[in-house]
Amino acid sequence: MSPSLKDKIAQVFDEPGCEHNQTKDEKARKKGCTKQLTPGAAAGGCAFDGAKIALQPIVDVAHLVHGPIACEGNSWDNRHSASSGSQLYRTGFTTDINELDVIYGAEKRLFKAIRQILDRQDPAAVFVYQTCVTGLIGDDIEAVCKRASEKFGKPVIPVNAPGFAGPKNLGNKLGAEALLDHVIGTVEPERMTAYDINIIGEYNLSGELWQVKPLLDALGIRVLSCISGDGRYREIAGAHRARANMMVCSKSMINVATRMQQRWGIPFFEGSFYGISDMSTTLRDIARLLVEQGADPELQKRTEALIAVEEARAWERIRAYRQRLAGKKVLLITGGVKSWSVVAALQEAGLEVVGTSVKKSTRADKEKIKEIMGDDAHMIDDLSPREMYAMLRDARADIMLSGGRSQFVALKARMPWMDINQERHHAFAGYEGMVTMIAEIDKALFNPVWQQVKAPAPWEETETAALPA
Ligand code: SF4
């Protein structure tokens, strides 16, 4: 590992926004999180993967993977992160290095690839991602990017997060470091207002940002940049002029928020767009921070008025499903804030939450579950696929909401399932998103296919009829 990458990782681990890190003494903090990775951990996503996930939603940038073609994986698209403009981010670019490059080095090949992309695609910038092989043969992507930037007069940004650096989470943060080192603060926005905010760690999956943006528009709050969903290079480069930052709960890019506070004095708060009360709290926090930073205090009154109208409208639409959904049992297998933030909406629609997984939840998340559901009986620490299957087969749950990995457990049990994690096809953010979620549950539960797959197959019926009485 190069000394600069080592330093960068140590810097990322010494994170003031990380509660765990702050409980350590000075010496331990400097050492960082030295826990050894479990062999095979990269199968769940390596650092390169994490950096690419974090940055690929910047839509007008060409994302060039410097490495063997297999690192790039899909040559088209990402995790349904939507764009309102350029589609360039969806194309996979790679230097596709071969054996000779491994022997002689692949820096020239990288330089040529950058030139080709700039000539053919004219992107706002090129992001160059380091991978294990090119990292191990010692290709200096920082030097190549610097030279290409000077020669072609366009930003060429090195993203130094080779897979061997660590897991996906670390990669998210190393990707964010590339923005902090080379992008944020390099362009001055054309105009600034007292109502400018950045949203950090929101990826606009299936267009979720667009369920929230109209609310901010209605309040006159401008999203100066979103890092990184539906992001534009120039907007992110000028993000240092925002009055406040919102850090979306996942903390995947907490280092952007803390560094921007240190460098430019931009205050931040952590919020979530999932769940009705969370959405309202987030709007209140944004308004409060902006007022503290000099916006007109009447913004808070307008925010309360908007919340009252939007909450009432959303609850009414959710209640409309009550009669159909009353008594249906839901098994919620997700993590973090979603393990509790969507529960209120489910309950309001008449659904009964029989269990929610807390494997990836913090202590605060668990407290919140207790508060909403009364006791900890509903918390599931770790449910094996076999147990999940048994729960569904014995009809202890009518539908499972989870990530794509467990979908086949539900399908095998011939029970409805809905994707609630990052590969979902529907947007579940804000007030609108909660109504969509209930509507989608309704569709999944009452889909006529379940009756058909649960009925005995024709040959089973024949066999039964043929048995002697
Ligand atoms: S960067 Fe390394 S760990 Fe990640 S996909 Fe490529 S070879 Fe595998």
Image (tube, grey):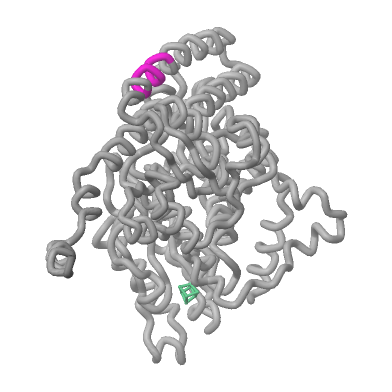
Return the x and y of residue 224 as percentages of the image width and height: 46, 32
For the residue pair 136 and 82, the one nearer the viewer reads as: 82
Quarter placement of the N terminus? bottom right
In this rendering, the answer to whether 322 lies above or below 427 is above
* Up-down relation of residue 398 to residue 166 (above or below): above
> x, y (%) of residue 449?
20, 49
Residue 316 magenta-highlighted:
yes
Q: Quadrant of residue 263?
A: top right
Residue occupying image coordinates x 52% and y 70%: 143
Residue placed most toward the observer, 99 or 143:
99
Give the percent coordinates (x, y) of residue 229: 41, 44
Q: Nearer the viewer, residue 1 or 287?
A: 287
Q: Residue at x 37, y 69 (%)?
A: 72
Q: Residue at x 51, y 77 (%)?
A: 132
| Residue 2 visible from this viewpoint | yes
Magenta residue span: 312-318
* Residue 106, picture quadrant: bottom left
